[in-house]
Image: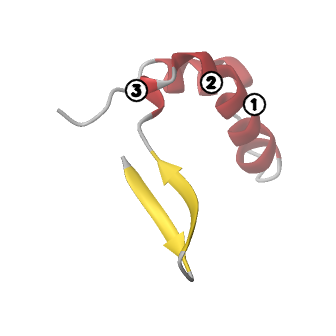
Protein backbone atom coordinates (compact mmCIF):
# COMPACT_ATOMS: atom_id res chain seq x y z
CA UNK A 1 0.00 0.00 0.00
CA UNK A 2 1.24 3.47 -0.83
CA UNK A 3 0.23 6.40 1.34
CA UNK A 4 0.26 9.91 -0.11
CA UNK A 5 0.80 12.91 2.11
CA UNK A 6 0.57 16.54 0.98
CA UNK A 7 1.74 19.38 3.20
CA UNK A 8 1.76 17.06 6.19
CA UNK A 9 -1.83 15.90 5.63
CA UNK A 10 -2.48 12.26 4.70
CA UNK A 11 -4.78 12.47 1.67
CA UNK A 12 -4.83 9.09 -0.02
CA UNK A 13 -3.80 5.44 0.14
CA UNK A 14 -3.21 3.46 -3.02
CA UNK A 15 -3.58 -0.31 -2.91
CA UNK A 16 -4.30 -3.16 -5.30
CA UNK A 17 -7.90 -3.50 -6.46
CA UNK A 18 -7.59 -7.25 -5.91
CA UNK A 19 -7.50 -6.51 -2.16
CA UNK A 20 -10.97 -4.93 -2.45
CA UNK A 21 -13.06 -7.18 -4.73
CA UNK A 22 -16.25 -5.47 -3.54
CA UNK A 23 -15.05 -2.31 -5.33
CA UNK A 24 -14.51 -3.87 -8.79
CA UNK A 25 -17.95 -2.80 -10.05
CA UNK A 26 -17.49 0.82 -8.92
CA UNK A 27 -13.99 1.09 -10.40
CA UNK A 28 -15.15 -0.52 -13.66
CA UNK A 29 -18.02 1.95 -13.95
CA UNK A 30 -15.73 4.93 -13.36
CA UNK A 31 -13.10 3.74 -15.84
CA UNK A 32 -15.75 2.92 -18.45
CA UNK A 33 -17.49 6.29 -18.10
CA UNK A 34 -14.38 8.47 -17.85
CA UNK A 35 -12.01 6.77 -20.28
CA UNK A 36 -13.85 4.39 -22.61
CA UNK A 37 -17.01 6.34 -23.42
CA UNK A 38 -15.34 9.77 -23.53
CA UNK A 39 -12.63 8.48 -25.87
CA UNK A 40 -14.98 6.68 -28.26
CA UNK A 41 -13.45 3.25 -27.64
CA UNK A 42 -15.18 0.14 -28.97
CA UNK A 43 -14.67 -1.62 -25.64
CA UNK A 44 -17.90 -2.39 -23.79
CA UNK A 45 -18.58 -2.28 -20.05
CA UNK A 46 -18.46 -6.07 -19.67
CA UNK A 47 -14.91 -6.11 -21.08
CA UNK A 48 -13.81 -3.44 -18.62
CA UNK A 49 -15.45 -5.29 -15.72
CA UNK A 50 -13.88 -8.59 -16.77
CA UNK A 51 -10.44 -6.98 -16.98
CA UNK A 52 -10.63 -5.48 -13.49
CA UNK A 53 -12.16 -8.67 -12.07
CA UNK A 54 -9.05 -10.58 -13.10
CA UNK A 55 -6.34 -8.23 -11.85
CA UNK A 56 -4.00 -9.39 -9.11
CA UNK A 57 -1.59 -7.59 -6.82
CA UNK A 58 2.14 -7.86 -7.39
CA UNK A 59 3.53 -11.00 -5.78
Farthest residue, direction front: 8
- Chain-order first, disc 2 or disc 3: 2
The mark nearer the N terminus, 2 or 1, is 2
At label 1, counting other C-alpha atoms closer than 10 Å, the crowd grade (few under 14, some 14-19, many 20 or more) is some
Mark 2 vs mark 3, foreground winner is: 2
Q: Residue at x 51, y 24 (%)?
A: 20
- Residue designated by label 1: 29
Instruction: Examine the rendered structure and indicate whether residue 30 appears above or below residue 24.
Output: below
The location of residue 35, given as percent across then percent down, is 72, 49
As displayed, is residue 46 above or below residue 34? above
Closer to viewer: mark 2 or mark 1:
2
The tag earlier along the polypeptide, 3 or 1, is 1
* Residue assigned mark 3: 55
Query: Is residue 50 shown left or right of residue 29?
Result: left
What is the basis of the colouring in this image?
secondary structure
User: Could you tell me which secondary element the residue under label 1 belongs to?
Assistant: helix
Q: CA distance from mark 2 to mark 3?
A: 12 Å
Image quarter of residue 6: bottom right
Secondary structure of residue under mark 2:
helix
Pointer 2 residue: 23
Is 2 above or below relative to 36? below
Front-most of residues 53 and 21:
21
Q: Residues within 10 Å of mark 2 (few under 14, many from 20)?
A: few
Q: Is residue 17 left or right of residue 44?
A: left
Query: Residue placed at 53% from the left, 78% from the top?
Result: 8
Instruction: State the separation of the CA atoms marked 2 and 1.
Output: 10 Å
| Percent of width and height locating residue 41 | 71, 43
How many marks are shown on the rendered structure?
A: 3
Q: Residue at x 48, y 31 (%)?
A: 17
Amino acid sequence: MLGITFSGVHIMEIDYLSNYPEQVKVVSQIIFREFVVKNGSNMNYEEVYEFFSNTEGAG
